[in-house]
Image (cartoon, helix red, strand yellow):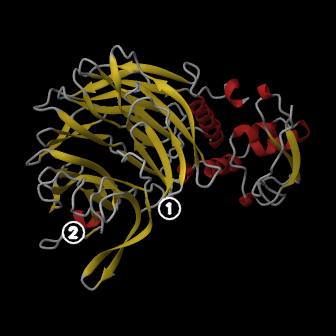
Amino acid sequence: MRPLGLCVPPRWRLSRPRGPFPSLGWVAVSAFCPAQTGEIVALKKVALRRLEDGIPNQALREIKALQEIEDNQHVWNEVSGTKELWRQLCLRRWSSCKTSQMTLGTQTWKEYYLCRSELEFRMECGRPEKDFICKAIAGHTGEIDELAYISTKECRFDGQEKSMVCTVSSDSTVRAWDVQEGTEIWSSPLQPAALVNVVTFPRLQLAITVDERGLIKVWGAENGWEQASFRLPTFSSALQACEHPEGPFLLVACAEGFLYALTVPQLQLRSRTRVFPSSPTSLLCSPDCQWVFASTQNSDLGPKVFHTRSLLCLVEGEPPVSTTLPIWLTSRACWAPDETARLMVTHRNDNGMQLVITTYELRTKQSREGVDVVVQQMASFLLPSSMIPPHLMKGHGSQVILLVSGSELALFTIHGVQLAAFQDHQRPITSMWVDQSRVITASFDLSLRVYVWNKETKPPVLKSCYHLLGGSHRWASGFTHVEGDSMSIVGVEARNIGTSILRSYCFKVQRGSDDCIN
């Protein structure tokens, strides 16, 4: 067997005597390999320096290897018992741990690190029954048109973790489900018309629905009680839930081309703005909810970007702060999640023959007349002429764009460098969910495909891992939607008889299972 070489990262350091570990001088570090590979563990001594220089951001493999070094047991015992070590490991590995709103609960940083490392291991392996439990959840008597998680998507391992989703259906009901248990929590009374969309405010524990006639309602997520309603003059073409620093609000586009801003949970009208006359409008809020992108597909009218604060505090007689982008025939758009105001838009070039993706940076500038929107083009590139026009588009980090064309998933940088292309599905992809750790695609081939980001490379590389299978093709026609949180994945499985069910995949954390840690 070949020995495993060791490359020690330059920031792999702990602390010297003046820090919280006064007896430390040198410590052996190791490269760890699974026992079943038969590869040799390599060891090397590294001088311990300042704590703030950093600790390795690899998984608990390094910690386990350090623990197993017999002649440094005293060092390990001292280091492993410190809160700061495990906090630093968490901060360096998961950016979500840096948020001030992170809920640690009753767990320690060490427990959090070990549990989340195990969870990621299981999500990457995807072994049925061993790593996850699959449940079929039925209840709706019509087609499920949309689903959204009502539980927060943060990782918790203190016994309080729970995944909940809300769904709306053509059977004119909204329902809430316990994903882990596979049970219905509540169902609304029969509504006057079929429900077509739902958005959620997990922090407020609210779900907001709209029916095919334009009636908007607010529901309490815990008990399903109706709290408020608002009627549009026509049906809604888009809903966006916005957690703004000045308070939560709802953006709604209606078929007449108007954009409504409503307070939450009261649904009081804050503003009504004409965007695209008599054209259904799509909406897309920026990650910090300071901007909203409004467009109408394949139109000669250029898409618009609004500064959301001006929609909430509209001065009578003055239009909201906005700008029109100098492009047309727009088809898809997305925001870069790691940037506050970076927008990527797919559109046609000047002669209308080729598809282009252009990246913009947005900011506001104070002028004598008021507030102006400043748009700076960051990058632009032509999509390959052989590529089918993408029908799904998502962003990752600050530089990566994910495009779905037919059954293919392709990754590009904002400068047009193609990073990867995957053809793991046999039939068209219908839905895509992206977060910092994973990408999940749903398809009419009755499967979900799970991909995992390798964040050690710049830009990050996406690894194709495994399929999650649905039910029988005899009864089902494929997956139409997919969503996920930190511990589960939920897909909408369409049935051949015109109904839908949910299929959930819940990943296990066994807190120290040998097949994960070893």
Q: 24 or 173, which lies in front?
A: 173
The x, y position of residue 418, in whole percent, is: 53, 52
Seen at 16% across and 27% down, the residue is 189
Question: Which residue, given by chain and number where applicable, does mark 2 sit on?
Answer: 320
Task: Name the side, left or right, on which 132 lies relative to 220.
Answer: right
Q: Is residue 408 above or below residue 354?
A: above
Task: Name the side, left or right, on which 363 lies relative to 108.
Answer: left
Question: Which residue, given by chain and number where applicable, does mark 1 sit on?
Answer: 415
Q: Is residue 367 above or below residue 408?
A: below
Q: Amino acid at mark 1?
A: His
Q: Is residue 68 visible?
A: yes
Q: 146 or 355, which lies in front?
A: 355
SS of the residue under disc 1: loop
Q: Amino acid at mark 2?
A: Pro
SS of the residue under disc 2: loop
**Alpha-carbon span between mark 1 and mark 2:** 32 Å
Task: Name the side, left or right, on which 448 lies relative to 348.
Answer: right
Q: Is residue 265 visible?
A: no
For residue 36, which quarter of the picture? top right
Q: Residue furthest top?
A: 474
Q: Which mark is residue 517?
A: none
The x, y position of residue 140, in whole percent, is: 25, 22
Mark 2 burial class by Cα count in 10 Å: few <14, some 14-19, many 20+: many
Quadrant location, the N terminus: top right
The x, y position of residue 481, in whole percent, is: 35, 33
Q: Residue furthest left?
A: 233
Mark 1 burial class by Cα count in 10 Å: few <14, some 14-19, many 20+: some
